[in-house]
Structures are given as C-alpha cells and as structure tokens.
Amino acid sequence: MQAAFQPAAPSSASPSSSPHATPPQHAAWALLDDPAEWPAFGRPVDGQGDEGQGGRWESQVVVEGMHCAACAFSVENALSQVPGVLEVDVNAATRRARVVWSAAAVKPSRWFAASAAAGYRLLPAADLFLRARRTREARLALWRWLVAGFCMMQVMMYAYPAYVAEPGDMTADAAQLLRWASWVLTLPVLLFSCSPFFRSALRDLRARRVGMDLPVALGIAITFVVSTAATFDPTGPLGSEVYFDSLTMFVFFLLTGRWLEARLRDRTAGALEALMNRLPDSVERLGADGEFTRVAVRRLAAGDVVRVLPGEAFPADGVVLEGETAADEALLTGESRPVSRGCGARVLAGSHNLSSAVRVRIDAVGDDTRFAQIVALMENASLQKPRLARLADRAARPFLAAVLAAAAAAAALWWHIDPGKALMVAVSVLIVTCPCALSLATPAAMLASAGALARRGVMVRNLQALEALAAIDTLVFDKTGTLTGETPRLGRVYCRQGMRPGDAVELAAALGQRSLHPASRAMTAAWAAQFRSPPAWELLQVTEHGGLGLEGRVRRRGLADAEAWRLRLGSAAFCGVQPLDIESAQIHLSDPKGWIASFVLNEELRPDACDAVAALKAQALAVRLLSGDRAAAACEIGRQAGIHAVQGDCSPESKLGTLRELQAEGHRVGMVGDGLNDGPVLAHADASFAMGNAVPLAQARADFVVLGGALGAVPAAVAQARRTLRVVRQNLWWAAGYNALCVPVALAGWLPAWLAGLGMAASSLAVVFNAARLALPAGKSESGGC
C-alpha cells in the first residue's frame, strides 16, 4: 500500500445508502477507495477489474476483536448484507477474512464500515502497522493477565482466614475488613482484566446475537454483584455469599488459557504470517548516476538492479549479476539447507541472503513472482473451513443458546433451596459449558498441519483435502515430470532425408519454447546447451493440446514475406506418424507433408522415487502408474520404481476414465501429476498433488503443490493427513466428553466457579496443545530401497 492504514474508532451509525458514498465518520477508510490501493490487499478475479473500475475483486483482511466461531458468523453476516459484496469467508482460528466484491457496486470503505458497525474492525492484510498492532495487543493481554494474577494472589490471601478460622477466632469487623480489601482488589480485575469480555458481550447484545463471551461476562457480572451485595450488606439474604477469590481465580485461569491459546495458535498456524512477512520494506537500487539509494520495494520494476545485503530477503525474482552467496529458500522450494547462488543463478523473492552482498537484476515483481503465487495459495487455504469445522460452527450458536437456558434452569431449580447458591450454580453452568474447545477442535488441527507441511515444501490449497487424503487407499502417479525428472535429456535424433539433426532440434525448440511440458523443455534445453542462442525461427502461433502435443506456425527471423511453416510436435498419433520401434520415450515432429524427425528422450527416475513408493506401500496404499508414453517405456519406469500396476498409451481422457472406474469400485483415489496435462485427473481425484517448480502455482488444479522435486513429500503428506484426522477426532471427542461430564456436576452444585473457569480454560488448551503436536516432525516411515 502507498500508505499504512489506521482506521478511526467505529461509529454505530449505519453506512450511507449510496453504494459509493463514504459517511463522514468513516472518512479514514476513504484511502482504500482509490483503485491504486486495491492490489495491495487483493487481486482482480478472473482477470477482471484490471483498471480498477467494474469487475470483481478478492480482498484479504484481518478481523480485529474476533475470538470464536460465533464472531466469524457475525462478520460474515454483516459483510454479506452490503450490496455488492458477493462472497465472504471468515476463519475464526486465523482471524482473517476473504471478501469478493464488485467494484461497480461497492467500494472497500463501505464494507469496512459495515464490519466496524457490527463491532469488528477490519485491517488490510498488507497493512504496514499490522505487526506493530498485534505486538501492542499481545503486550496489553499480558498486562491484563499479570494484573489478574497479582490481584488473585492478594484476594486469596485475604480469603484464607475465613476458610480456616474457627468460630470466635475473628471478630465481625476483621472479617468485614477482609471483605472490603478483597472488593477493592477485585475492581482492577473487573475493570481492566475483564474489559475484553464485557466489550464483546455488549457488542453481541446490541446486535441481538449470542457470542461465546456472553456466558463468561454474565458469570463474572453475577459473581461480582452477589459478592458485592454480601460485602455491603453482610446481614442481608446474600450476606454469606462472597466469591471474590473464585472470581479473580476464574479470570486469571481464563486469561491464562486465552494467552497460551493465542501463542500456540500463532505458532502452529504461523507459517502464512511468517511467509508473508519475508519481503523487506526497502532495498538498495542502482540509480542512473551509478549510486545505490534505498527505495520502497513496491517501486521496483523489471530490469532494475538492486544490491541485497547479508541478512536481507530478496525483494523480487531475479538473476545474480555480481557476487556469490548462499540463500535460504526453505519456505519457497522445500529445500531445508542453504543453496549456493552465484553469478547467473536465479534467486526468488522472499528467500534470504545469508552470506555476502550480491547485485541482482530484477526479472519479476509483485504478482508475477513465485513468492506471490505461494502466498495466494496459503491465504486461500487459511480461510477455508473444512467439513468438520463447518459442522462444529453450525452447532456452536444453538449450543450457546442451550447454555443460557441450562443456566436459567439451574438457577430456578436451586432458588427455593438457597438463592445465593442458585446464582453461583448458574454461574458455574455458564462458564463450564462455553463451547470454545468445540469451535477450535478442527481448525486448530488443520492449520497446524498446513503450517507443518508448508515448512516442508508442500502447499495446501484445500484444507478439506487433508481429510480426503487421510482416507485414500489408492495413489496414481503420472510418469513424465513426476516419477522421472522434470526435464528429460535428448538422446538420439532420427530425421527424414534432407533434414539435418541440428535443424530438426532447432525447429522443435522454436515450437516448444513457450510450453512447460517436460518434452518441450527437453528440446529447448538441448538447443540452448549446444548453441547458447535463440532458434533462428520466429514463433507466430502455437496451440497446446493436453496430453498430445503442440501445433503451431514458425517463420525464419527477418523474412517477413516468407511463408509460415505449420508444424506439429508430440506423440506419434498426434503427428500422424509411425512410432519408433524402441522402448524409450519419444516425441515426433511433422508438417502437412508428413514425418520430419523423431527424438528419443532419456528419462531418469527421481532419486527418491523408490523410497517414496515403498513408503506408500508401507502405509497400505495401492500404487499405480498411468502414462501417456508407450506402454514399454512406462513399464520400464514402473519396474525401476517398484510399481507393478502400469498402464501406458493413456490420453488425458483415458486417465480420467481409469480414475472414475477405480472410484466406482469404491476406492478413494489420490493422484500425483505435474499439473500440466493432468488437470482433469487432478481435479476429479479425491486428493491430488502437483509436482515440480515449473507448475503455474496459482492455476494448479491440485489440492497440494509440492514446491521442490522431492517425491518423499507425498508419503509424508499422507502420514500427516492421517495424524491430522486422528487429532481432530480426539479433539471433538474431548470437547464433547468434557461438556457431558462437567454439565451434570455443575447442575448438582459440586463445581465452584473458579474450578469451572479452570476446566473451561483447560479444555481449550488441551485442544490447542493436541493440535500443536501436528507441527512437530512425525516419526520417519520405514521405506525400502530399489
């Protein structure tokens, strides 16, 4: 963004009825109505809205003041009612929201104001002050916890004599003095430490909704009112009901739980935040006078030369012009060890320069960088709600209403016995049944796993896919670019009479220079390795037919009047020629007159393919291979990898047909492909992986994207998904069992308020701690060798 955004305090006034008007009290958001600011916290959808007018935009924002699933419902409801807002997804665990809106119907200030009117302020996800604001909030939360802890210890000290004194040990005046001292010490807890609970409850009451802080605030308020009445009127009907010790202990336990929960949540789901914060704010750029001056990263453009110092992150994708260093690319490629980057080597935005200063020529900035594509994947994943999480969220709101009803019923049942006891039983029921653990059970585990996989180089595009991946029983591999290396080597060339092998390679390289298919890259790499210059043919037009090959027109450079040559490069059937009678992988080149050349490609199995297949079999998965290459070549690669179920000569349609046949037989099928020609199969599989650095990440159809070339990431992801589902089930059973056990105890009057608060905090902590285990490395699976 061109300026950091800090909104003013929200007003309760409703937004203007005009879709473009910004009310005066919300003028602080007017900055966001400038179309130049929109790319800083969003992107145009489906290529629309490039000019900032009309079209649809998808924006990422952070929601302040949100603590639970009920809060997420409230934000979604407030934003969905704004005309022009098309989609809203809010994740309570990450406190982030995705908003799809029409620039022709509404401006950001309008829906920012609508959320603020509902009691939840929004911040652009790229706000410069966001980290500083979160640091201040964490420091304030720590102070609230310290005040509650100090006052609790003092109140416990004053309450202790009343518990141990025998009749006649203390005078009435001494007992009353201790009560007054406890009341005074409870005030800072009530007014400062408890302020977030009361603000949230008041906001929910104004909006006529039930949030998770409402039962907590009611319990605190009732306890304080009853204890205050006993302090001011010790001879009255509530004269013996003094619970300042229980109140302060409950608040201390609750704040302890929430503080630890926030720390654990940030650690387990913090891979997104860690990744987004890797870009530097500024960098040294080479000026026309030959001097370096520090400029904002957003001012960089392709072609600029920058100097990146040791310890700084690379601001954009580029090529090293001068110097040699080591770079940390762990979160971008999955490579855990530093990699050497010398003159001519590519560096990636977001990776860290570790050893020495280097000069870099910028090749790609902003959304064109690999960094931006990875961030987009992780943002989308962090905002998704898995099926189990949606079920828990739907149950949370009616459950809260049932909590209030149960508390009222408990008070009614006990009132005729002891009004003071009745009120405290109601407080215990309100506190102990708060469904925080239920709402955290699934998202905490899913996000912890997504963060752990991201640190290992696997991006999770779809959180729901973790549940699907845990259930698969069959895994299907593509061959070229998946089991084999990303770029095969050119072995032999066969040409028709009158065509030299070098000329045939040049034609194939010219036709394949815009394709990401491994065979096309093999031809361009073979030409570049021998001649180190572009082909002398100009590519006029090219069409890529998935799973078949390329068709296009080329013309000699500098001969504008020459007739274009129409060529085909791909499989034998696509080119209309006879295949070579050899088992190796092969592609062919033809024109309208017929066969021009055939190219034999030498494919090498990835070094870890055997271990990965063995690890998958050890996980009781059936492994299959589907390839578009000839059956003999596919069987040879399958034999080397240890895969016995191999099918060659597959078109994309036949791959999809085989997948559907397996699913019709009752199998849960996962697919591993290179993300290029396998789009339909990846999309229809129960869970899918796209391999390889060359895959356009933002357009991948797969549920998981493996950033590096390590096939070992696939069995590791399957094991992680199974661990995740076990932890989710444990969390849900714990949350349900905790309430089933504690509610009857509270109704019976056997659960004091402080113990109810301890149980509530412990239940949420147990769920988050259990989920945090998923961020730890799993035990290495045993795998066999080749």
Image: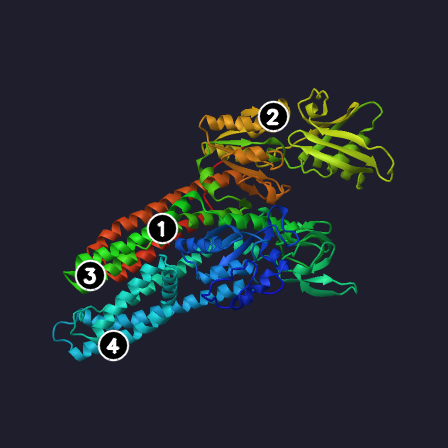
In the image: residue 371, left or right of residue 758: right
Residue at numbered disc 1:
396
Q: Position of residue 121 (x, y in %)?
A: 48, 62
In the image: residue 565, left or right of residue 636: right
Amino acid on which the number 2 mark rests in the picture: Cys
Mark 2 or mark 3: whose residue is earlier in sequence: 3
Query: Mark 4, mark 1: which one is toward the viewer?
Result: 1
Up-down relation of residue 153 to residue 431 (above or below): below
**Label 1–label 3 contact, CB within 8 A:** no
User: Residue 336, can we see it?
Assistant: no
Q: Secondary structure at mark 2?
A: loop
In the image: residue 188, left or right of residue 613: left
Residue at numbered disc 2:
650
Mark 2 closeness class: few <14, some 14–19, many ≥20 residues within 10 Å: some
Residue drawn 54% across the image and 59% down it: 18
Q: Using the numbered discs, state the Cα–Cα distance from disc 1 to disc 2 in whole angstroms.
A: 49 Å
User: Residue 94, can we see it?
Assistant: yes
Q: Using the numbered discs, state the Cα–Cα distance from disc 4 to disc 1 in whole angstroms.
A: 39 Å
**Label 1–label 2 contact, CB within 8 A:** no
Query: Mark 3, mark 4: which one is toward the viewer?
Result: 3
